[in-house]
Image (spheres, rainbow, N blue to C red):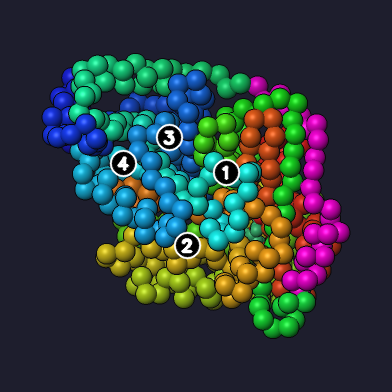
Amino acid sequence: MIEIKEDQIASLLKEAIEQLRTEDDRRLVSFTKKIATANPLQFFEAAKHIRENRAFWTSSSQMLWLTGVGTAFEMGADESRFEVIEAAWNKILNEAYIHNPYEVPGTGIVAIGGMSFDPENTQTELWKKFRPSQFRIPEFLLTKYDSSYYLTINVCVRKNDHAKQLAEELRLIEQKLLTERALPDHGLYIQDENEMDSDKWMDIVRRATEEIRKQNVEKIVLARELRLTFNRRADISPVLNNLLKTQPNSYIFAYEIGDDCFVGATPERLVKVEKNKLLSTCLAGTAPRGETKEEDMKISEALLNDEKNRQEHDFVVQMIKRGIKDYCTQVAIPDEPIVRPFKNLQHLYTPVTAQLKDGYTILDIVKQLHPTPALGGSPKEESLAFIREHELLDRGWYGAPIGWMDSSNNGEFAVAIRSALIQKNQASLFAGCGVVKDSDPQSEYEETKIKLLPMLTVLGG
Ligand SMILES: C=C(O[C@H]1C=CC=C(C(=O)O)[C@@H]1O)C(=O)O
């Protein structure tokens, strides 16, 4: 393993710059080093006044933490989004200069990003900064994997760049980012709340059950938005800190674009690929937590035996099974779900394991799986058509895949639920629920209320 030394960074940059022919040419140079320690959240906070566009991710097991700062390279797509991103990603990886002596997932060139729930739905002002698909390779990436820390610096060099000067600038920023600092106080309280009239929303649920009874569609997931106004501009790092403290076993994420930041604590993995081993999760079917251990157990047992919830869950299991079968070998799915408790709710849960066949990428699987019936419905096209026509909501990136991928075809995407789009002193929170033929609109409304809680609580609610 060859560690990179400070003076070698300038030579590496120089070598890359000298290869460029025209002033329009650019090339990504990436070097990774192991560092003693760094706090991912403090790194995120330190970046606030240095670079725009921060990103934060921790897996539900907290095995991997990523903090991305700035943008070395951006990939975006409005149409054919999987194909366009895959082509741009391959081009970057083919041309880049990479110095990464570690074979650790989430180090080196890592693209962090996400996409909108439904590119065919009309995009409103609310989500105007978030493209149908967008990924960034951060300029500075802190990776915590298990108990080791790595810093990757990615620079997009141009012909007229001065290698020594660039290396010195990077060194100074690195120093600032790694300086320990206290997180700011939260200090948020809610001044105003706005949401669609509950009766109107329950009417949409009723219409969905009618549509299902007509047998055109089996399950439709309907969501709603809660708009909050705060006493002050919301700082993102204390929100993340509170989510880390209050939402164990969840993916905590943030993706910032200018003044907007999409933040969440989702329990739902879409897919993880590590060294070709694939993991996916079916999570659908919901019940509240009990006040006592006994009550909790009782509710959990009832959930496991509830026909409506089992049906909602099974749509997801069957779809994931179909979605991955041509891309994987050794697919293993238990026959029965288990109940997985989270802070505010419990869900039916079925894990899926498989081996990804050579030649396929994590994006191929995301394309196959999104949206699963946990967020869209079943059948897919019919449920999406209903959502587009009746939901009256721009879901934006809510309910869609969010995650990362590295140059060794490792990566992980979660489904961005239990989330909020924070915009200075305002935020939109989203929550949805699976509607099947016997769904009761009032109970579905209550369920979305509980699903809003994780974000509401950390935002001063
Ligand atoms: C759509 C959401 O949850 C999904 C994930 C788990 C359980 C669900 C349910 O039981 O309805 C939903 O399908 C949400 O939290 O906004």
Say if the magenta span includes residue 195: yes
C-alpha separation, residue under disc 2 versus residue under disc 3: 25 Å
Q: How far apart are marks 2 and 1 (CA)?
A: 30 Å
Name the one closer to the observer, 160 or 69. 160
The magenta stretch spans which residues? Answer: 185-209
Q: Nearer the viewer, mark 4 or mark 2?
A: 4
Q: Is mark 3 within 8 Å of ligand 1?
A: no
Q: Could you say whether the residue bearing mark 2 is in a helix, strand or loop?
A: strand
Count neighbours of disc 3 (C-alpha within 10 A) and say few if under 14, some if 14 to 19, many if 20 or more.
many
Q: In this view, does 325 lie to the left or right of 161?
A: right
Identify which amino acid the numbered label 4 is placed on. Ile
| Residue 274 drawn at (x, y percent) | 35, 54
Is the Cβ of the residue at disc 4 closer than 8 Å to that at disc 3?
Answer: no
Q: Which of marks 1 and 3 is in front?
A: 1
Residue with the mark numbered 3: 68
Number of the front mark, 2 or 3: 3
Q: Compare marks 1 and 3 and give the one earlier in the sequence.
A: 3
Q: Where is residue 391 in the image (x, y as percent from the top left)?
A: 71, 61
Which residue is tagged 2? Answer: 280
Task: Give the mark toward the camera: 2 or 1.
Answer: 1
**Ligand 1 found in image quarter:** bottom right
CA gap, disc 1 and disc 3: 22 Å
Which residue is the site of mark 4? 109
Secondary structure beneath dot 4 equals loop
